[in-house]
Amino acid sequence: MTPLKDKIRAAAIATPALTALLGTNPFRFFDTQLPQGSAFPAVVVQIISGGKSYALNTRLATGFSRVQFTIWSTNTAAGYASQAALEIALANFLDGLNLVGIAGLSQYSNIIVDTRDGFYAQTQPGNPLKQIDAMIFSNDSL
């Protein structure tokens, strides 16, 4: 069984709109935290919680997991533009992310529940970031 974060990353690297913004070598789509010295823009993915669905006394293979995507960029006009482009590309990616094994749907049951702006002031001149919280529906048996 492949972990959810690996399924998300594999689907992301196969998405041309994301590779155009995040590069391919390295693909700046990281797990849990931003590596020191990373180029921007970059995305950090963190699994916040994962739940299973139940029917009567049975646990199902499907369920929603809360996933946080943090988009890092530079404090420049180009940085803010790349952050906005990544937010759109990520929303489109989530619309088509199929981790349930049902083909042919125009949109899948992934839901963006919140977006928040942030700023990391420890560096000079500081780095803006955007956090996108999503609920991703997946099937563990795939």
Image (tube, rainbow, N blue to C red):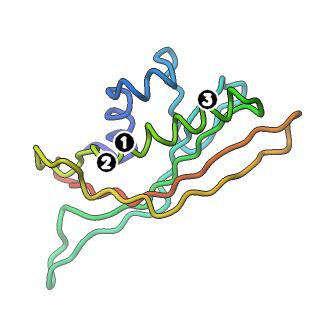
Q: Is residue 136 above or below residue 128?
A: below
**Residue beneath the point at 39% across and 36% down:** 9
Residue 128 found in image quarter: top right
**Residue beneath the point at 17% across and 47% down:** 142
Residue 3: percent from the left, percent from the top? 34, 46
Q: Is residue 100 above or below residue 24?
A: below
The three-letter amino acid code for the residue at tag 1 is: Asn
- Local crowd size for mark 3, using a 10 Å CA cut-off: few (<14), some (14–19), many (≥20): many
- Tell me the CA gap for discs 2 and 3: 21 Å
Image side of residue 32 versus residue 119, left or right: left
Query: Along the line of sight, which residue is nearer the eye, 21 or 81?
Result: 81
**Residue beneath the point at 51% across and 53% down:** 68
Q: Mark 2 touching mark 3, by CB under 8 A?
A: no
Residue 88: percent from the left, percent from the top? 47, 41
Sequence-first disc among 2 and 3: 3
Residue 4: percent from the left, percent from the top? 34, 48
Point out which mark residue 56 bears. Answer: none
The residue where tag 1 is placed is 92
The residue where tag 3 is placed is 41
The residue where tag 2 is placed is 95
